[in-house]
Image: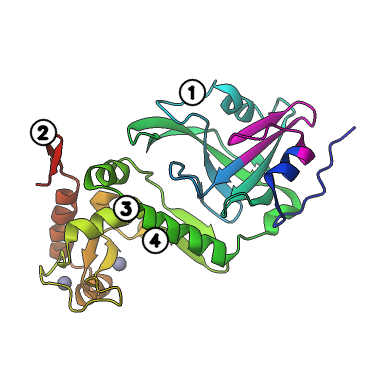
Amino acid sequence: LTFRHNLTAGDTITNAELTRIFKCATQGGMRRSHRTNSLVIISDHTKFIHQDRWISETLVHYTGMGLEGDQSIDYLQNKTLNESLTNGVRPYFFEVYDPRKYLFRGEVELAARPFEECQPDKNGKPRTVWMFPLRVVGADSAFCAPQKLVARKLQRKARQARQLPDGELFTMAIHSRRQPSNHQTTSTSYERNAYVAELTRRRANGVCQLCDQPAPFFNKKNEPHLEFHHITWLSRGGEDTVENSVALCPNCHRKMHILNLKDDQRKLEQEAQKNCCQLTIDGGVVYV
Ligand SMILES: [Zn+2]
Ligand SMILES: [Zn+2]
């Protein structure tokens, strides 16, 4: 008897409905059900900790199980998912953009070998996590997440980053993922790392990192207007990291995109390097 869920990508259900359909546990990011031989995988964007990311319209990099310390590939459902090409268990992928609303994305399969990367744990400590490249399969792979939801998720992340104290923000920014996300909605746009952007903005402190002049005007929130720039452009393989990010006035930003002079690049690289430095004295944070 094969299990039928009768869901189509884009359907939104409650947790109660989800557990009834898949006959799985009511909690957890990955929920194995022996009764339906399925593995329900949930990417919850309302939680602070997790850094799952879409690489293309059908490929997501999903963070494994374990909130604290280094993750193990042999731990519970990490093992189930890692062996899912051969163990007969079918993985299904859900996203949470709004609390208690589970958006069905479809059946997924392991698209490549899981790999390790550094991410902060729930206490903000850097640790090793396992990332699972998962590809949506079948008819559901034609579905794209609504632009509205994705935009709201990015705004929420930016807001969370703004509220972090300097020390925590530094840890999150320095130990965050290396590859930018590429979110396929109606148009393709890179999903920037909110911690990296916020740290860069805070360190620039209203002054352009190329011409060293104050921002030319204030925005509607009365903040100095500077623009976020990657020294090596993402489109040329640059990374979304603190050492590749600077804040520029609109003039200098245009200049970098039109001329991209070697001397200017060198100056920006030095500025970005300064953003990576931190001294800790008596628990207080001093930047050098
Ligand atoms: Zn400037
Ligand atoms: Zn730029």
Is residue 49 in the magenta section? no
Identity, as a three-letter code, of the amino acid under mark 4: Ser
* Label 2: few (<14), some (14–19) or many (≥20) C-alpha neighbours in 10 Å: few
The quadrant of the picture showing ligand 2 is bottom left
Q: Nearer the viewer, mark 1 or mark 4?
A: 1
SS of the residue under disc 3: helix
* Residue at the spot of label 1: 72
Q: CA distance from mark 1 to mark 4?
A: 33 Å
SS of the residue under disc 2: loop
Q: Is residue 194 shown above or below 170?
A: below
Q: Give the mark, 3 or 1, whose residue is nearer the N terminus.
A: 1
Q: CA distance from mark 3 to mark 2?
A: 22 Å
The circle on residue 235 is 4
Identity, as a three-letter code, of the amino acid under mark 1: Ser
User: Which residue shows up at 36% across the image and 30% down it?
Assistant: 127
Q: Give the mark, 3 or 2, whose residue is nearer the N terminus.
A: 3
The circle on residue 126 is none
- Image coordinates of residue 2 in percent, x first then y, are 87, 35
Q: CA distance from mark 3 to mark 4?
A: 30 Å
The reply to whether dot 2 and dot 4 touch (C-beta < 8 Å) is no
* Label 1: few (<14), some (14–19) or many (≥20) C-alpha neighbours in 10 Å: some
Is residue 29 in the magenta section? yes
* Residue at the spot of label 2: 282
Q: Nearer the viewer, mark 3 or mark 1?
A: 3
* Residue at the spot of label 3: 163
